Image (cartoon, rainbow, N blue to C red):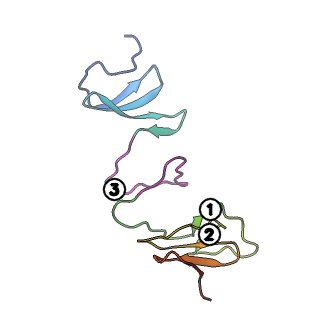
Amino acid sequence: MANRSTPVSSIYTGWFKNEVDSTLDLYRAGTKIAAYSSALDAVTGAITASTTITAGTGLTVTTGGATVTAGDINGTAGNLRLGAIATFGTTEPTSWVVCKQGTQPAGAITTSGGIGSDATTVQKIIAAGTINNVET
């Protein structure tokens, strides 16, 4: 039998060994919904998980973003880092929100608030659209 890149059945559901592209493909009702390649070590296509996803050495999003539509984002150890943070001089903080110097927002922010850093102060913005230094 010749190498194949698609299942024989047009209604196939399950895993398929794509011998042409050297991938393990996942099909549902004849439609390829994901492909796994050990050479790329990547999954292409959408993944819907109804349970916990555990990433052993980290989870990296290179395009787009990560969106949580329900529930919480919990960090049980370490820091929340915004921007490419330089190494701290002596003591690395724990359980901190660490902000790299960024661009201040322009215009009114009507239904939200935010915090940021201008490299020398921590600043906040509230619905009035005014940026103020956070009190010490």
Q: Which residue is mark 1?
A: 83
Q: Which residue is mark 3?
A: 51
The one of 130 and 65 positioned closer to us in this rendering: 130
Membership of 53 in magenta stretch: yes
The answer to whether mark 1 and mark 2 are in CB contact below 8 A is yes
The one of 131 and 33 positioned closer to us in this rendering: 131
Mark-to-mark CA distance, 1 and 3: 29 Å
Q: Work out which quarter of the rendered image holds the C terminus and state it.
A: bottom right
As drawn, is 39 to the left or to the right of 89?
Answer: left
The kind of residue tagged 1 is Gly
The residue at 33%/63% (across/down) is 70
The one of 49 and 17 positioned closer to us in this rendering: 49
What x and y, as percent, mark residue 115? 55, 74
The residue at 27%/27% (across/down) is 30
The 10 Å Cα crowd at callout 1, few under 14, some 14 to 19, many 20 or more, is few
Q: Nearer the viewer, mark 1 or mark 3?
A: 1
The kind of residue tagged 2 is Cys
The one of 53 and 89 positioned closer to us in this rendering: 89
User: Dot 1: what SS?
Assistant: loop
Residue projecting furthest to the top: 1
Quarter holding residue 83 = bottom right
Q: Which residue is mark 2?
A: 99
User: Dot 2: what SS?
Assistant: strand
Chain part drawn in magenta: 46-67
User: Dot 3: what SS?
Assistant: loop
The residue at 24%/30% (across/down) is 29
